Each structure stands twice: as C-alpha cells, then as structure tokens.
Amino acid sequence: YLPAGPGPHPSVILIHGGGFLIGTRTMKPIRYLATRLVQAGFAVAAPDYRLLFQGGALEEAVEDVSEAFKWWRAQADTYQLDPERISTIGLSAGATLMWLALSRKALHPSRVVSFFGLYDFSWLSGPRAHLLRRFLLRSPDLASCQSRSPMSQVELAAPVLLVHGDQDTLTPIEHAREMQALRERAGLRTELDVIAGARHGFLNNAKDPVCEPCITRVLNFLKGD
C-alpha cells in the first residue's frame, strides 16, 4: 500500500492476528489500518506467515515475520521508503510474533505499536493453553513457555505504544500492564492506551466508536507527536 506523492515515505509493517491458526494479510483490520496509514502518508507492507497446521509453529511464524522485516527494509529504493522511519504494528497473535521477530534484531524500528498482544505464554489456561503449548510451542514446560515469550524479551529500544481494551477476555489487559511495567523499570519508553469498554479484536468493526480516537492516537504516535 503506497501513498501518493514523492518519497521518501515513512512506512509501517502490519502483522495480522488470528490466534496463530487463521488470518491473512487481507483481513478487515489490516485493510482498515493500511487505508488510514496511507491516507496519513505512510507506505505499508502486510505480510502473511505460516499458520498452525499449515506448516508453521512458533519458530516458523517468527522466521517469516523476521524475513518480511528484512525484505521491506531492502525495498527502500524501490518504494521510496525512508529507512530511518520504518515502524511496526502487530495485532493479537501478530503482536506476539512481531515482538519475537524484533528480538532477533531483524529490524530496528523507529516506533512500535502493539494491539492486544499475548505477551506471556505461561499465563495461558484451559483448552487453548493445551493446544498452543502442544502445537505452537511444542513444549508443555512452563519455564520454557515463559522464556520464549515477549515478556522475557522487553529490551527493544524503540518507543512502544501498547493498545488494549479493558474488557478483553482473550488476552487480558494484565498482559499489557505487566509489559509496560517491565519496560519502564528498564528505562524504556512505553505508553499504554487503555480502550475503555473494548474487547479483543475491536478493530474488526471500524464503525465501533472506540476505533476513530484510537487510530488518531496511533497515527500521532507514529508521527512522533
């Protein structure tokens, strides 16, 4: 997705969600965000990654996101991108994968926005926990799950905006609050935008009244305001 006019353009890499099981780069929240970003002058790339039961567990999905980051930076001349202003946005499972790919130094983003992410695998419970530990993490060990979680890899230097609904029952807001606290203790700039009354995946409905103020906030953050 490319904006009108000459570059170099700031850009954003969007990583879709879907619980590691479903989702594509063309799903509604990605199209919505890409449209708003392009209108604001950003170029946008939205990759796919290998999903569970379609060739991908955690390592494969993170590898794909990492390669997408490297590819986008290499396209700076082709798409008139500003290599010093490449940001990332991840949604849900995509936020989790984004964090893990960034921890591999695949990209040094200028800004990071993380929507309702799963930041600690050891907090999972119930049938979903069994599924993800067995097939995504390929390990039942809680210590292993925790060490491979974004919460254990918080040293990313870029400014971070965490966005989370306070009615999220899929990845409770405690994930975001703990991530913010850990990063702030490390002296890393981290902002938390709590969306009152919002549930998980609220960007699926662009007409939801919480969306417009949220997108304005994200755009201002990406611009450095």
Image (cartoon, grey):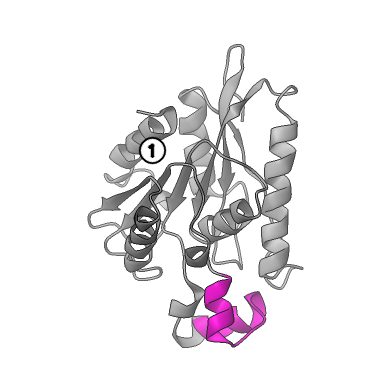
Instruction: Give the structural element (helix, strand or loop) at label 1.
Output: helix
* Image position of 152 with respect to 112: above or below: below
Query: Can you identify the residue that label 1 sits on?
Result: 218
Name the image quarter holding the N terminus: top right
Q: Residue 39: x and y, percent? A: 47, 24
Q: Residue 156: x and y, percent? A: 51, 50
Q: What residue occupies the far front of the structure in this picture?
A: 186
Dominant SS of magenta comes to helix
**Would residue 144 appear left or right of 53 to someone viewing this image?**
left
Q: What residue occupies the far left of the structure in this picture?
A: 196
- Residue at point 53% right, 68% down? 149
Boundaries of the magenta span: 129-148
- Residue at point 43% right, 78% down? 123
Classify mark 1: residues with Cα within 10 Å, few (<14), some (14-19) or many (20+). many
Q: Residue 155: x and y, percent? A: 50, 54
* Image position of 101 with respect to 72: above or below: below
The question of residue 131 being in magenta is answered with: yes
**Would residue 75 appear left or right of 144 to someone viewing this image?**
right
Q: Nearer the viewer, residue 211 or 8?
A: 8
* Image position of 194 with respect to 21: above or below: above
Q: What residue occupies the far top of the structure in this picture?
A: 6
- Residue at point 64% right, 75% down? 136
**Would residue 3 appear left or right of 78 to someone viewing this image?**
left
Res 94 quadrant in image? bottom right
The question of residue 18 being in magenta is answered with: no
Amino acid type, label 1: Val
Q: Residue 33: x and y, percent? A: 48, 39
**Would residue 38 appear left or right of 165 to someone viewing this image?**
right
How many circles with numbers are drawn on the protein? 1
- Residue at point 38% right, 38% down? 218
Name the image quarter holding the C terminus: top left
